[in-house]
Amino acid sequence: MKSLKAKFRKSDAHEWNKNDDRLLQAVEHGDTEKVAALLGKKGISPTKLDNEGKSAFHLAATKGQVECLGVMLTHGVDLTVPDGSGYNALHLASKNSHQECVKKILQYKCPVECADSNGKTALHHAAGSGSILIVQLLSEHKCPINIKDTEGFTPLIQAAQSNHAEVCNYLTDQGADIDARDKNGRTAVMLACENGSGNAVEILVKKGANLKLVDALGHDALHYYKLSGNADVLHFLQAKLKKDAEDSDMKSAQASKQLDPTIKIYADRSGTPKKRKAPPPPPPTSATQSSQSSEAVTPDSLSPRSSECETSKVEEDSLQVILQSNIQFYTILKAKRKCWKISAGLVASVGREKS
């Protein structure tokens, strides 16, 4: 930071004169006419920095002197020029919650994505100051919403750390990453817990902040709550954790119900297999026939398997008898029908001869 100031001292300080001092004083007091008159003098530049690294243009943005700012803008200034601290006019107006100055600067097409020496954009500064109207204005002008500064802070993390719940709510609605992490792995809800920002914690929890995340040291949101001891923060954390547990149980129950039909079908398919009929015994050979005839067959020697074979053979013989009977019946019926047709033909021919 000091090197930046030294740089401006070397380049511009030797050109500083009484008119530059007068311009600074006129801006300080909001004397628009005097500002306009001084800008007409030769060698006067509204962005010229003094030994402290400030200019009339940056001072107007800092103090909210929108009319003086407008006069200087009409004379043509470089909107991206930083002061000795690395802030441009848009950063300063946003940081100090001067909405009208922000509007005026944006009318002159100031790039909203410009970052200061710490990597912060105007949206970072507006979120940190809690100016919801400026945050909305910058978002409408497409200022990057998830951009990180040199510490890894997003505008949402900046707002959460400063307990600006309304800004947190708006940024999450606009698509801010609620679980974005800084360089130390900390999320917005962790920093809100650390600073006892109950309102911000409530909003972030409702918007779905993940309380199971841990930072680079393995600390979660509950650990950061202990640093502040805020009762409201603890209440919101416990309510969120309880709801997450209930939702998890409900999902598990639904998953098990969906599996039940599948398990039942599998059980039905993998049940006791159907009994198969035993194959008929092989035809006896001459040797076996002679041996079987030589052996006496007693009721005790009959096994269940042999009885089943005998039963199936009886059933087969019965079916063959029935089938043969049906064939004979069909043959007789067919012969009778043929006779009937012949008789009918003879009767018809006799009738024709008589007539």
Image: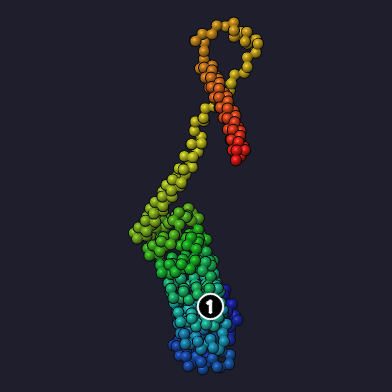
Number of labelled discs? 1
Q: Position of residue 340 (x, y in %)?
A: 58, 33
| Residue at the (63%, 11%) spot, across then down | 288
**Quarter of the image with the N terminus in it:** bottom right
Left or right: 130 in relation to 304: left
Q: Quadrant of residue 31?
A: bottom left
| Residue at the (57%, 30%) spot, across then down | 336
| Residue at the (46%, 67%) spot, across then down | 173
Viewer-nearest residue: 158 or 276: 276
Viewer-nearest residue: 143 or 196: 143
> In the figure, 310 relative to 126: above or below?
above
Q: Position of residue 105 (x, y in %)?
A: 51, 81
User: Residue lying farthest right?
Assistant: 286
Q: Amino acid at mark 1?
A: Asn
User: Residue lying farthest front?
Assistant: 354
Left or right: 231 in relation to 6: left
Left or right: 291 in relation to 89: right
Q: Position of residue 10 (x, y in %)?
A: 59, 80
Viewer-nearest residue: 282 or 49: 282
Figure colour scheme: rainbow
Q: Quadrant of residue 47?
A: bottom right
Asked if residue 52 can be seen in this view, the reply is: no
**Quarter of the image with the C terminus in it:** top right
Q: Kindly state the secondary structure of the residue where label 1 is placed.
A: loop
| Residue at the (41%, 61%) spot, across then down | 206
Q: Position of residue 139 (x, y in %)?
A: 50, 73
- Which residue carries the number 1 mark? 88
Q: For mark 1, does the 10 Å Cα neighbourhood hold few (<14), some (14 to 19), or many (20 or more) residues?
A: many
> In the figure, 292 relative to 18: above or below?
above
Asked if residue 299 can be seen in this view, the reply is: yes
